[in-house]
Image (cartoon, helix red, strand yellow):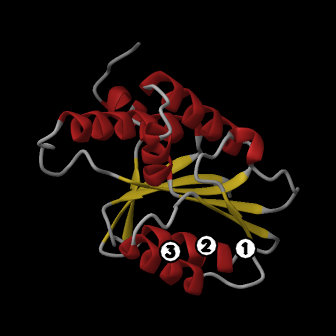
Amino acid sequence: MTVTRSILLLGGVRSGKSSLAVTIGQGWRGPVTFVATARALDDDMAVRIDRHRRERPGHWTVLECPELRADELPTEPGGLIIVDCITVLVANLLFAGLDDDAVVDRVTAIGRALSRRAAVVVSNEVGMGVHPATELGRRYRDLLGSCNKAVADSLDTSYLVMAGRALRLDDGHGILHAMGVTR
């Protein structure tokens, strides 16, 4: 049996991504480190952060890294790393003034570092919704899509989470093979 070591959980808001990540962590037979990227910049975010804190076991190690870099990830052998979430990380990096290439490079480095570890990464899929009305909204949507792809390319597998259910995503190579397409 092949064991999946690193996964990306993608989905919309309140789709069950974070709950699934916590459930995976609760079943892990070793230490769990939860890497939180959110900042409580308003009352709504403070409520969300508090709800997420209550959902996590108290014995987990929690790192608050709103501008996470790959070198901040724990290196404890046998441990599971949960990163929640790339969505907020990308926004934080944009507001910190990083250009798009620097954001993608940072997130790509995080994905590569996690590819060698047991990891669950959470991110939103924002490309399936309404076309953003502002230039910043479009930039963010496109940038997050690029970052999600970079993480998915690094990790073992990805799942789309909707209504608390997860659907495994194919990497596209099976489709190419089925169609007789060679690169």
Tell me whether circle 1 and circle 2 mark residues in contact (CB < 8 Å).
yes
Disc 3 marks which residue?
49
Circle nearer the N terminus (3, 1): 1
Which residue corresponds to the image point at 12% horizontal and 50% vertical from the top-left? Answer: 130
Mark 1 crowdedness (10 Å alpha carbons): few <14, some 14-19, many ≥20: some
Tell me whether circle 3 and circle 2 mark residues in contact (CB < 8 Å).
no
Disc 2 marks which residue?
24
Q: CA distance from mark 3 to mark 2?
A: 19 Å
Identify whether 182 is placed above or below 81: above
Mark 2 crowdedness (10 Å alpha carbons): few <14, some 14-19, many ≥20: some
Nearer the observer: mark 3 or 1; the answer is: 3
**Residue 166 figure quarter:** bottom left
Q: Position of residue 45 (x, y in %)?
A: 42, 70
Q: Position of residue 137 (x, y in %)?
A: 24, 41
For the residue pair 118 and 105, the one nearer the viewer reads as: 105
Disc 1 marks which residue?
28
- Rendered-image quadrant of the C terminus: top left
In this view, the residue farthest toward the top is 183
**Secondary element at image label 3:** helix
Identify whether 8 is placed above or below 14: above
Q: Position of residue 175 (x, y in %)?
A: 33, 34
Circle nearer the N terminus (3, 2): 2
Q: CA distance from mark 3 to mark 1?
A: 23 Å
Identify whether 117 is placed above or below 31: above
In this view, the residue farthest toward the front is 42
- Rendered-image quadrant of the N terminus: bottom right
For the residue pair 159 and 35, the one nearer the viewer reads as: 35
The amino acid beneath tag 1 is Trp
Which residue corresponds to the image point at 47% horizontal and 22% vertical from the top-left? Answer: 101
